[in-house]
Each structure stands twice: as C-alpha cells, then as structure tokens.
Amino acid sequence: MILTVSWSAFSAPTGYMSLASAAFFGVGVYTMAILGEKLPFIVVILIGAMLSAILAFLVGLSCLRLKGVYFSIFTFGLSELIRHSVLFYEMEVSGTVGRLVVGMDEVSIYYTLLIVMMVLLIAVRSLGRSKYGLALQSIGQAEQAAACMGVNVNTVKVYTFAFSAFFMGLAGGVMVTQWTYVDSRTAFNMFYSFMPALMAIFGGLKKIRGQVVGAIVLTLLAESLLIKFPYLYMFLFGTLVLGAILFFPTGIIGILEPGEKWFERHRKNKYAAS
Amino acid sequence: MRLLEVKALCKNFGGLAAVAGTDFHVDEGEIVGLIGPNGAGKTTIFNLISGTMKPTSGEIRFKGEDISTLKPHEICRKNMARTFQSANLFPYMSVLENVLIGALFGASVRMDEAREKGRELLSFVGLSMKENLHAKDLSVHDQKRLEIARALATEPELLLLDEVMAGLNLSEVAEALALIKAINGRGITILMIEHIMHAIMGVSDRIIALHYGRKLAEGTPEDISRNRKVIEVYLGE
C-alpha cells in the first residue's frame, strides 16, 4: 500500500509510468540488511529512505527527459541492473548470496508501517493540494505548455520522483525486518515494480482512496487465491486483473462514482430543502 | 525602447533552414504582426523566442539581455508569455486551475493572490461563468481565450499570440480583436501571428512579412498591403 501510494504520487498526475519501485524498495531493504545491527532501527530506516531518494534524484536527472514507454523501460532496466550489481557484489566481494537481518516483532513492524503510511497519506494529500500538485498535473497534461507558463518542469519531476522513492525506501527498510533473510532477488524483485502500478490502476489512479482500495483488494485477492488455488493462482489472478482493467478502466473507484454523485446530489438537495 | 530584438536568427531542421537569418525588433507598447505563407517559419520563430527550441545561430535579446540559451520557464519568468497555435491547455484541469499555473509559477504569487488574479483575468477575457469546467470541455473560441488568460496570468511585458483567431467565425474574430486591443491598452506589447488578413491589418502598428525563413518586407499595414513582393508571395504573381 505504501508502495502504491508513493508510486502514484509521482506517476498518476504526470503520466510517467515508473517501473523502478523495486530499486528504491530494495535500497531500503539492503540498507537495513547491512546497517541493521550497527545503528538504531529508526536511523537505519531513514538512511535507507534517504539513499533511495538520492538514487531517484540521480536517475531522475538523467532519464526524466525520456517520455512514455521509453521512461518505463529505462526504469525497469535500472532496477534489474541494480539487482544484478548487488548480486555480483555479494558473490564476488562479500562471498555470500544472502544476508541475515535482525528481526523485529510483528507488532512493532505493524505500527511502524502504520505510521509511515499515515505520514505518506498526509504528505501526498497536502502535496496534491499545493501549487506543486497543480504543477505535476500540468506536466502530465501538457508539459511544453507548463514549461512556457514558468513551471520548472525538470525540477518538479525530479523532486517528486525522489519524494516517492523516499517512502519506498522506508517501506523496504521496515518490511525486511519481517523476513529476517534477504538476497538480491527478493529485495529487488520485479514484483515490487509491477504491483504498485497494477494496484493503483486497479483501484483507480486519480484518487488516493482509489490507490488505497486497489492495494488492499489486490493484496487480499492475491493472498486468498494463493491459499485456495496454489497451482492456478497466477492464472486466476492475471485473468481477474486483466478483466478489471478492460471493463473498469477508471478502476474500482470509478464504478462507485455514479452512486457517489447521486449521494452528493441527494445530500445537497436535503440541505437546500431544510 | 527596444523590448525584443532578433538578429541573424537561424534554425535548421536537418538540411532545411526553417529560419534563415531573420532580423527584426519589437518596441515597447507596439502591436506587431507576423505574416507569411505556411512554412514561412513564423511558429518556429515563436518557439525560438520562447525557448521551446534552441536557435542554430543568431541572437535574441529581450529587454537588452540575450535569452537564446535560457529555458522556457526562465524566459517566462522574465515576463514574456506565449499562446500556442493549437490550444495547448491542461485538458483535465479546471479553467481556473489553468490560469493558476500561470500566476503561481510564471508570476510567482501566493495561492490566494493567484486565485484573485485568476478570477480577474477570467472575467477580463469573458470566462467568469466557466471557471469550474474542465478546459477540454470549452469551445474552440473559449479555449483560445483561456490560453490568453493563462498567458496574461504570468504578468508578461511581451505577449506572443500564435494564430489566436484561427477557426473563429466573423463575430468571434471581432471580439478577439477587441480583446487584443484591450490587452495592449493594459500596457502589454504584442507580437502576433495571424492568417486572417483583415484582422491583422486592422490591429497591428507594424507588420513583418516572412517567406522561406527570411524577412520579405516590413512596414505599416498600408505599406505591406501595397508591397509587390508580398502580393506575389500570397497570390502567386
């Protein structure tokens, strides 16, 4: 859910579909794996998040000039590159494949994630309402016009990209304490790149609640399918998601919208009457 | 005073010279028309001046400063704004939000000021009643007016208008002319591209005619309409 909302903070308004979430998540994971024992937990998480943001900043500078599908492919390639580099480093230099991570009890993980989620939601919401939220939208809809209206297009894009990576790094750092063991394949799993995008599109890109709903529903769906149909899991899951995107292009939230509008009108009428 | 001065401006696209050594200037307070057949390089000149494209060679001076290497948003903040030939609005943002972008980033005012200013400009161009509509739902005429309002929100000294009257009917053209005069009355200098001859002849102080990226003629509307070379280019003999 954190991944989904952070991904959407950048990709939904601008239309730049990033597939590098796994890279930013993984940086958080590895920071925790390497520094976890040496420094206090909170500090390590924040360092991981900062590193993610710095990585995003550098990546953003170089590749946010690319548009559309080129940008997606570049970011996808980037996270694979990092995954393989980490694997290479671990095998050649440190002579291991995976690392043990200091675990945490589930309750503190839960609360830490909850806090991160809250901070993220508040941050994204106020960002969306600020002038930068408007600027992001304008970039997504007519980048050239935005530039000619005085919006520093590159700066806005790069900083937002880093902002979204910061939270992905946070999520990575916290999540890994639950696993107790990581290697580069789990930390930089492509899954973490595709799922946020899928969840956001599934739930409804345009609104934060859509992204949240999408994340919850898809996670539950994936888990329950996995339990009930361990062999057909991927097949069923894929079909469902495909169907949802084909038939409900505005996401789950989009289905509810007409009802919502009716409700609002109804409420307004009632106010008008009283 | 010279507000804009363009010297030996060139832009090549591959082997094609879209702008091939053009010189002209715009003085403060003027309305200058830029005319020429399709492919004469008019819009390319606008793109070069506003920073959307980089010139191959030549010089563009705005308020005495060379701006040819600046980025579009930097040029905008130096108080020059433009509209686009085919309306280039933010389609899924409201009419007011479109104008807010110009005010917030071009003129760097605070949100509440920007709103006030935005509403004032919308009523100036006649879109007050439509501030909550999506920009994409406006008629062509209204979209052009919104483009102008958005550009004005950046507080320009020089406004570049790229065919704001294309696709409008006669009465709408008359309205647009009145609007252009009113903008000029606010002390804003205007450089405009237009194909509708009677319109641009009626409103311009001075006209520059382009052909194949070169300046063909320059003068008052009367001079231009009597100029043999211009008539040849436009009417073929």
Image (cartoon, grey):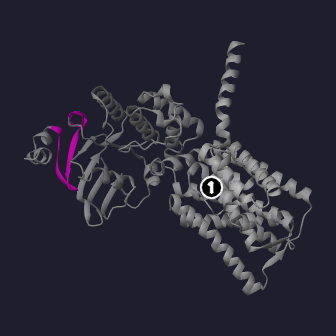
Q: Residue at x 21, y 43 (%)?
A: B207
Front residue (pair A227, A211): A227
Front residue (pair B21, A9): A9
Q: On what subunit does the disc labeled 1 rest?
A: A
Say which residue label 1 marks.
A160
Vertically, is A151 above or below B11? above
Front residue (pair B218, B39): B39
Q: Residue at x 61, y 59 (%)?
A: A18
Vertically, is A182 above or below A70? below
Q: Left or right of B205: which side holds B102?
A: right
- Is residue B207 shown in magenta? yes
- Is residue A235 shown in magenta? no
Q: Position of residue A45 (x, y in %)?
A: 80, 64
State the count of labels. Answer: 1
Residue A250 lies in what quarter of the image?
top right
Q: For the residue marked with disc 1, what is the amino acid?
A: Thr
Badge 1: residue crowd in 10 Å (few <14, some 14–19, many ≥20): many
Q: Residue at x 28, y 40 (%)?
A: B30
Q: Residue at x 62, y 64 (%)?
A: A57
Q: Left or right of A94: which side holds A248?
A: left
Q: Position of residue B14 (x, y in %)?
A: 30, 66
For the C terminus of chain A, the quadrant is top right
Q: Left or right of A46: which side holds B211?
A: left
Q: Position of residue B197 (x, y in %)?
A: 21, 37
Q: Left or right of A23: which side holds B147?
A: left
Magenta span covers which residues? B198-221
Confirm whether residue A249 shows in the render.
no
Confirm whether residue B206 shows in the render.
yes
Q: Secondary structure at mark 1?
A: helix
Q: Position of residue A113 (x, y in %)?
A: 82, 55
